Amino acid sequence: MFHAATLGVAALLFTGVACTPREGGPAATGAGGAPPPSRSQSTAAADGSTEAVAAYKAMWEEAVEASHTANAKHPGLDDHATDGAYQLLLHMMRGYQKDGVVARGRPTFAPEVKSTSADKVVISDCSDSTNWLMYRKSDGQLEDDVPGGHHLIDATVRKHGDRWLVESLYIHEVGTCIA
């Protein structure tokens, strides 16, 4: 779950900071006479939105794994995030460590591309953290009786060299979107 105290401060501190994207490049076409990509597939490959969304999803995969142990030194945290987005993830993990909690379960994500340019993709997401909750390390009990919920997430992903990286990340409060 997006720990409320951590998010309130972290989202404000780390929103809009620039970063460096990673994975990138045009989508490969099928071999052996496979049909060429459709116009929408070609556009997605040309504007990087496919790679940017993949980087966004991969960033969250690493963050969720790190949250299960509250590990701010998780080796994958900086694989798909940089600058403000990376700092926010670190802040979240350090907050979990300080509070003696770990996450269990997994959130769901539904990223949508809002705008694109040659090296920048803006993503909006309605994440559901209902099944991603915080538990006390000391006794394994649920931290509180506050359920997860739907959070609007705004992200900016940029291309840096041949990689796409999430560079800014703003996680809004529970109830800011409807799935």
Image (spheres, helix red, strand yellow):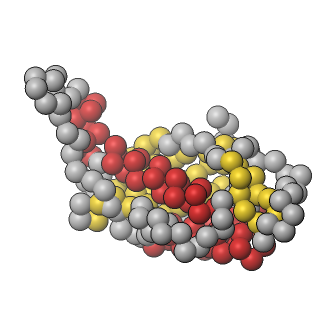
Whether residue 119 is visible here, answered yes or no, is: yes
Q: Is residue 74 above or below residue 68?
A: below
Question: Which residue is drawn at the image coordinates 81% and 48% (left, top)?
Answer: 147
Q: Quadrant of residue 159?
A: bottom left
Q: Residue furthest left?
A: 33
At which x and y percent is residue 123? Answer: 46, 49
Q: Residue furthest front?
A: 139
Q: Quadrant of residue 20?
A: bottom left
At which x and y percent is residue 126? Answer: 60, 43
Question: Which residue is drawn at the image coordinates 68% and 48% (left, top)?
Answer: 105
Whether residue 176 is visible here, answered yes or no, is: no
In screen coordinates, is 143 left or right of 45?
right
Question: Which residue is drawn at the image coordinates 57% and 67% (left, top)?
Answer: 89
At which x and y percent is residue 19? Answer: 40, 69
In screen coordinates, is 34 left or right of 79?
left
Q: Quadrant of the C terminus?
A: top right
> How many marks on residues?
0
Q: Is residue 112 above or below residue 133?
A: above
Q: Quadrant of the N terminus?
A: bottom right
Q: Residue furthest right?
A: 145
Which residue is more in the foreground, 94 or 105? 105
At which x and y percent is residue 157? Answer: 40, 57
In screen coordinates, is 101 left or right of 108?
right
Q: Is residue 93 above or below residue 68?
A: below
Question: Which residue is drawn at the image coordinates 66% and 67% (left, top)?
Answer: 70
